[in-house]
Amino acid sequence: MVKSVSLVNNELDTNGFVTTDAINYVTDKHGSVVDVNSVKRSADRISEKTPGRYVVTYRYGKASGKVAVTVRSDVNEGISKTDAKLGKGGNVGKTWFPHELAFRGNYNA
């Protein structure tokens, strides 16, 4: 699961944020991947119309976890400016090809 979700207030929202979207994957005690819809959630959806902070609890068997979902009141809330300048990186514009690693014996292309 992700630790937190940040959403922008949307007055036109009709569906809400689907809380299963915060789940990357779930495994059972044997390590097999489980359908995310098998996870019990304290809320199925969170409305993006009402700004605030919500906590969703997830449970599968004995395992549980919580995700903080924040609906921001405007698009700029929580965003700050920076004075950082883009610098020239060592591989700017270079395309990566898997076959480059194949020649080093680290990758089977």
Image: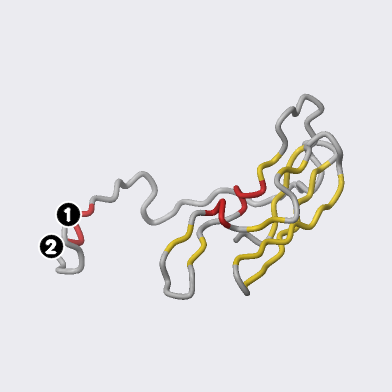
Q: Position of residue 81 (x, y in %)?
A: 74, 47
Q: How many marks?
A: 2
Residue under label 2? 103
How far across and how far down the image is residue 44, in percent? 70, 46
> Which residue is situated farthest in the top direction here?
12
Residue at screen point 84% across, 52% down? 53
The reply to whether callout 1 and callout 2 are in contact (CB within 8 Å) is yes
Tell me the element at label 1: helix
Q: Which residue is mark 1?
A: 99
Q: Is residue 10 above or below residue 23?
A: above
Q: CA distance from mark 1 to mark 2?
A: 7 Å
Q: In the image, 38: left or right of 50?
A: left
Label 2 amino acid? Answer: Phe
Residue in view at x 48 percent, y 69 percent: 28
Q: Quadrant of the C terminus?
A: bottom left
In the displayed structure, 8 sits above or below 90; it is above
What residue sits 63% from the left and 74% below the top?
62
